[in-house]
Amino acid sequence: MIIHLEPNIQPGQLAEVQQKLTAHGFTSTEVRTQSHHYLVGVGKKPIDIRVIGTLPGIQDIHRVSDGYKLVSKKWRVQDTKIDLGDGVGIGRGHFQIMAGPCSIESEEQVEAVVKHLVANDVKIMRGGVYKPRSSPYSFRGLGQEGLQMFHQICREHGIRIITEVMMVEQIAEMHDFIDIYQVGARNAQNFNLLDALGEVDKPVLLKRGMSGTIEELLQGAEYIFSHGNEKIMLCERGIRTYENAYRNTMDINAIAMLKKMTHLPVIADPSHGIGIRAFVEPIALASVMAGADGIIMEVHQTPEKAASDGQQTLNFVEATEAYRRLRATRKLWEEF
Ligand code: PEP
Ligand code: MN
């Protein structure tokens, strides 16, 4: 059960609601986000929610019996929109492409990608400075210094930054240099990291774990939301299955399902989703038709020379064509 409290609820009124919940066999957790104040009630006994809903200080009340609650579409029917300023929005009808290399490598590389994005009216650049690599001997990123250079160049051109955060300690030092924190598949259930991201005032893109279920992804988002941050996007990036003809199995189903289950924007990552350059664009187009609110994909001037994930990275010519088709496909989807 979600009880949406009035912003000016008095302490005595709050205590009364909490006591009523306890009396009906419900435990309650107070959640104060950057924009709202809630009580989340968990209990098994049947209850007439009007008993609670008519108490003073309550804006509205909803029955949500799933394990994830605040991120559920059962109580908030209007989709969440992530606002990045200057008309750049994601969700609630707003579609965005995020593109850039797997890893930030050099100033020349960032300059080339930024120029390419500006020419194609892409507003958000991706690029990791802390790279979670399967092997400790692979390139692990340029770190904070690389991030500052990345930020400097992007800021000059009005490009927003999405980049991965791997540890709680990195959150604060990255804060002023990024627009969206990315939580990678390998950290999808790092609950300490998710809790800490609940305390920041910047959007978070949470990727699905390699073997994570849709419910686990939603529960991960619930950690961030219930710690105070409502600005969350979910990302389908392929899961590990018995199939090994490609890197991961892009679960297009999940995009359609998530759009039904949650009010949060859903982003598709076809690059990691299939892991093969030639198929990134068709899988991206399929994701748009499944209802994705955005696409994040890997793009590099010379993918053959990329420090990581070159095999799934588009060059500028391929990417330019992909953006055109993505936008045309999105238009088609909107007309449906
Ligand atoms: C990435 O975006 O480069 C990345 C490491 O993704 P994932 O966490 O989905 O593997
Ligand atoms: Mn990558």
Image (cartoon, helix red, strand yellow):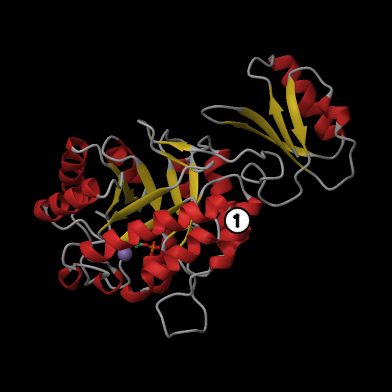
- Up the image or down, 221 lies above or below 287; here it is above
- Up the image or down, 13 lies above or below 211; here it is above
Quarter of the image for residue 73 reads top right
- Up the image or down, 330 lies above or below 238; here it is above
Q: Quadrant of the C terminus?
A: bottom right
Q: Position of residue 86 (x, y in %)?
A: 35, 30
Q: In this view, does 169 lie to the left or right of 35?
A: left
- Per the image, label 1 sits on a secondary structure element best described as helix
Residue appearing at x 16%, y 39% in the figure:
152
The answer to whether one can see residue 209 in this image is: no
Q: In this view, does 44 lie to the left or right of 117?
A: right
Q: Is residue 213 left or right of residue 299?
A: right
Q: Quadrant of the N terminus?
A: top right
Residue appearing at x 41%, y 73% in the figure:
274
Answer yes or no: disc 1 within 8 Å of ligand 1: no
Taking the image in four quarters, ligand 2 sits in the one at: bottom left
Q: Position of residue 187 (x, y in %)?
A: 43, 58
- Up the image or down, 268 lies above or below 309; here it is above
Residue appearing at x 43%, y 62% in the figure:
185
Quarter of the image for residue 37 reads top right
Please name the amino acid that badge 1 sits on. Answer: Leu
The answer to whether one can see residue 13 in this image is: yes
| Viewer-closest of 277 and 7 | 277
- Residue at the disc numbered 1: 258
| Viewer-closest of 13 and 285 | 285
Q: Where is residue 83 in the image (x, y as percent from the top left)?
A: 43, 35
Q: Position of residue 307 (x, y in %)?
A: 19, 67
Residue appearing at x 49%, y 62% in the figure:
287
